[in-house]
Image: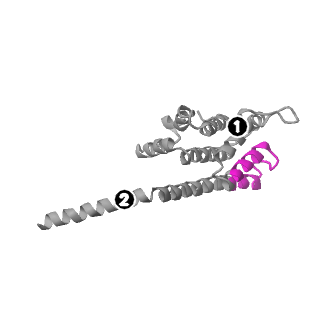
Amino acid sequence: MTVTVFIFLIALVFIIYQILAIVLNVREIRRLRDIRYQTKTQHSFGVARQNLLLLVANKKISDDSITFLFFYLLNTNIMRYPDRYKELSRMLREALLTDKPNSTGSGISDLLKKESEDWDEEVKNIITQNIDSMTFLMVSHSPVLRMVWVLAKLSHKVWLKDKYHGVMSKVAKLISRNDKSLVTFAEARDELSSLTGVV
């Protein structure tokens, strides 16, 4: 047996061992990946909530405005329960998409639209942070969207801007038959984007 053959056999055994280790640990890898995405999701919405509170502290928005109340509730719920995907999507659908009028005769989405006329750039930036966080939440729950996310990053384009804006929503709607919660997040994200004037 030559040295070359010996080295080749050692390399082959090592590769087979690595493949078997990966196959046997797929469940653990998935669990750790889910934990990582949940942590990133919590952090993303945590930053958005912190910035929202800074706006209130700086008197850019009122703490009894629908803008503050809606986004504070959204951020807090997702921070606390990032794994309750279906419940979160139901909350968004009821608040933004199948809006129920409150006692004054206006629904949450109508009130947000009215208040959005007075949003300055700082407030719009916070809303955009929430939109980007919602996109990451969608990515964390869909292998297809994760693939689109990776491809977009590899293309060296600025994500969620220019011609890539809206790609996540479009892909989410294409696969909506398999995940109704996903399309709810996509539609809610589009609704918020329209409020900030992002095309």
Identify the residue at image location x=43%, y=43%: 151
Q: Which of 85 and 103 is in front in this view?
A: 85
Secondary structure under badge 2? helix
User: Where residue 156 sits: x, y (%)?
Assistant: 42, 45
The residue at which mark 2 appears reads as 20
Identify the residue at image location x=40%, y=56%: 23
What amino acid is at disc 2?
A: Leu
Q: Which of 25 and 146 is in front in this view?
A: 25
- Whether 72 is among the magenta residues is yes
Which sits earlier in the primary sequence, circle 2 or circle 1? 2
User: Where residue 160 sits: x, y (%)?
Assistant: 53, 41
What amino acid is at disc 1?
A: Arg
What is the residue that sits farthest to the left in this orientation?
2
How crowded pointer 1 is (Cα within 10 Å; few <14, some 14-19, many 20+) is rated as some
Tell me the distance, in whole angstroms, between the alpha carbons under discs 2 and 1.
44 Å
| Image marks 2 and 1: residues in contact by CB distance under 8 Å | no
Res 51 seen here? no
Q: Quadrant of the C terminus?
A: top right
Within the image, what quadrant is residue 51 found in?
bottom right
Q: In this view, does 168 lie to the left or right of 101?
A: left
Secondary structure under badge 1? helix
Q: What stretch is highlighted in magenta?
A: 49-77
User: Where residue 188 sits: x, y (%)?
Assistant: 65, 37
Can you say whether 138 is above or below 4 in the image?
above
Q: Is residue 56 left or right of residue 196?
A: right
Within the image, what quadrant is residue 135 found in?
top right
Q: Quadrant of the N terminus?
A: bottom left
Query: Of the numbered discs in the image, which one, if any, rests on residue 93?
Result: 1
* Count of labels in the image: 2
Identify the residue at image location x=77%, y=47%: 69
Identify the residue at image location x=44%, y=59%: 25
Q: In this view, does 156 lie to the left or right of 40?
A: left
